[in-house]
Image: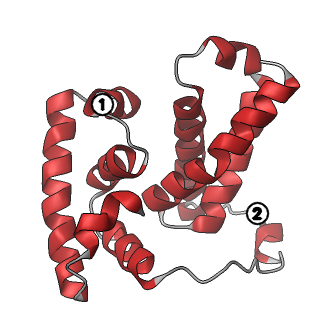
Amino acid sequence: MDEVEFDDFYAASYARVVSQVHAMIGSRDEAEECVQEAFARAWAHRRKLQSAEHPEAWVRTTAYRLAVSRWRRVVRGRRPADRALAAPVTAPAPDERRVALMTALARLPEDQRRALVLHHLADLPVAEVAREVGAPEGTVKARLSRGRTALAALLAEVGDGGLTEGASRA
């Protein structure tokens, strides 16, 4: 993958992957940082990525793993001090439907949330979700079913019953 191909890949994938990782981990800032790091690693491994069947999945998985690693460091109390001193990042206010969806997703078990995001937001088929999360297809189907049921109940609590139909568009 040469520089132009990589730039095109980055431009086509960045926003989508950030949105998906954000939905999985719940923090947009953290998602952006992890995706940026994942793309930096992708650049270093671009020859391997060129032969990869799904380079976007490689970046998304790398970003998710980076987020998990960062979370573990935070839990252990080893978060770098300079992050706390950084200037706050301002972003446009999200719409109410997106906030309701993100809030409801955050209340789901991690496995269900990840399966729902990969299947509905990343538009991956069940087989690809299973491959990416390392679980059998039947397990992924069960997580999707249980996750959709729980998500619908959580969204009904918010009083936005129409959101469940648009969840795949978020």
Task: Name the kind of residue labelled 1 in the image.
Answer: Ala
Residue pointed to by mark 1:
130
| Residue furthest right in the image | 3
Q: The N terminus is located in which quarter? A: top right
Residue 41, can we see it?
A: no
Residue shown at 59%/44% (left/top)?
A: 63
Q: Position of residue 15 (x, y in %)?
A: 63, 53
Q: The C terminus is located in which quarter? A: bottom left
Left or right of 19? Residue 10 is: right
Residue pointed to by mark 2:
80
Left or right of 152? Residue 53 is: right
Specify the quadrant of the image occupied by residue 55: top right
Q: Earlier in the sequence, mark 2 or mark 1?
A: 2
Left or right of 156? Residue 79 is: right
| Residue furthest bottom in the image | 159
Q: Is residue 101 above or below residue 118?
A: below
Residue 10 or 106: which is nearer the viewer? 10
Question: Which SS class for mark 2?
Answer: loop
Label 2, residues with CA under 10 Å away: few <14, some 14-19, many ≥20 = few
Left or right of 47? Residue 104 is: left
Q: How many marks?
A: 2
Task: Name the kind of residue labelled 2 in the image.
Answer: Pro
Q: CA distance from mark 2 to mark 1?
A: 34 Å
Residue shown at 70%/34% (left/top)?
A: 9
Residue shown at 60%/35% (left/top)?
A: 59
Residue 111 or 163: which is nearer the viewer? 163
